[in-house]
Image (spheres, rainbow, N blue to C red):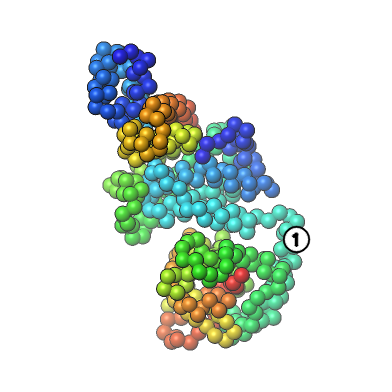
Amino acid sequence: MKCAEVHPDLATFVLGGLEPEEAAEIRHHLDSCPDCQSELQELRKVNRALEAAPPPAAPPAYLKGEILSRVRAEWLPPSSKAGATEASSSLEEQRRSHRTSRFNRFKDLRIVLPSAAAAALVAVMALGVFFGFLREEPPVATIQLIPTPQEAAGLKGYWGVAEIRPQPSGNQQVELKLNNFDEPETNSYYELRFVSGDKRISAGSFTSVGKGETRVLLNVPPEASNYHTLLITEERVGKGPAPGREVALEGDMP
Amino acid sequence: MTQRADEPSDEQLMTNVDGPGVEVALSKLYDRYSRTVFGVGLKILSDRSMAEELVQEVFLKVWRSARTFDSSRGSFSTWLYRVTRSVALDLYRKRARRVRPVSDGDPHLDSARDPSAGPQEVVDESWLSWQVSRALEVLDAPHREVIDLAYFGGLSQREISERTGMPLGTVKTRTASAYKSLRKELAVQDTSLEATR
């Protein structure tokens, strides 16, 4: 065998992908060819480097959208900022008119759907038809969870969403993703509620890790599909089944 | 993802990340580097959800810290590696304070990391992983395919030929060509090692 015939097969030889008789011919040639031996050493270096290769895996497709959404939410061009401020004031006024304090917020809850401008501000992102019949990921709805003004004052770098996924059982899975959401106070915990008028369905309770991202999976029964407002309330241990009054976060279905 | 010659360089995109073109620029950088960040994250953290968190944090940091990137001090890839290493180490330490994750049988995770290695050791090894990942990412699709099937899939050249329908000679030629590209790319990247120190 000549070098010109051996060279194209050396990489395959290093990989161990040649048939036994082909590999034997290569080995025979290598025994007497320093140039090909040298080439072989270089290719083996590549092979050793490949051992350090990370697994050939890609991040989930939704991640890019999440990152760009966060950038969009945090970065607004100057022209949008003016509109956003105006909308923010409008929303703030609406909210103020509906609550006198954080503690009676739940009792006084009347708003369900804000105005169009406010809806733009809260940036509710519909990724599909809410509570459709899809059984697989991605979520059919992503709801931005907005802190109440009282809660917002103490939060830095917060963002949060609730992702809704219908389950084969008919229940709805809710995945909460909350970043830099404060831990509840001592002897307290958070509860996620679906609200429609005076009716409420609890999706379960949880705590948060404070700094960093908290991820929680909860489930609600199928009838929650008609409850269009989400509230996260802070509850105190030992207060019984009465609904919580300290609303920390809220969001509306698209 | 292979970068076409007529596309903006990473460094050009970084100038747009700090301005109105942020979404397009960040999106392109994500397409080019997210697999590498995620793969190296899996290697370091051995935890898929934390590797996802890493990807998110890294690209948000790219956006927020765009002004600190100075192309005269090194390539974007090297800078991004340093960002990734830093965030991964933070996540590794954060996880160390929690319960140790149990492998769920995911082959990507099972092969990802020696569990006896310490955090600094694992993170230090990640530079080579990064280099190899980048070298693989710049291969075009046909060459990447033969390497994936041969090295990661463990298929012989004949099996690759049967699976893809490529003539055996083409498989061999592409393998040789892919190794040549990897060798060249790794040599280029090795020269930027000092920039990571």
Question: Picture coordinates of residue B34 (x, y %)?
Answer: 50, 46
Q: Which residue is mark 1?
A: A82
Q: Is residue A247 left or right of residue A238?
A: right
Task: Report if residue A18 is visible in the image.
Answer: yes
The percent position of residue A19, horizontal first and vertical second, equals 27, 28
- The quarter of the displayed image where residue A226 is located: bottom right
Classify 10 Å Cα crowding around label 1: few (below 14), some (14-19), many (20 and above).
Answer: few
Picture quarter with the N terminus of chain A: top left
Q: How many marks?
A: 1
* In the depicted structure, whether residue B26 falls above or below residue B78: below
- Residue A45 in view, yes or no: no
x then y, percent, for residue A34: 30, 13
| Residue B180 against residue A220 in the figure, above or below | above
Q: Residue at x 44, y 70 (%)?
A: A167
> Residue B70 or A133: which is nearer the viewer?
A133
Q: Where, quadrant-wise, is the C terminus of chain A in this rendering?
A: bottom right
- Which chain letter goes with mark 1? A
Say what amino acid the circle numbered 1 marks: Ala
Q: Nearer the viewer, residue A220 or A247?
A: A220
**Is residue A47 positioned above or below A234 on the image?**
above
> What residue is shown at x 59% (from left), y 53% (from top)?
A68
At a point 60% along the width and 73% down the height, the residue shown is A252
Task: Tell me where residue B42 appears, x and y as whole percent.
Answer: 39, 48
What SS does tag 1 mark? helix
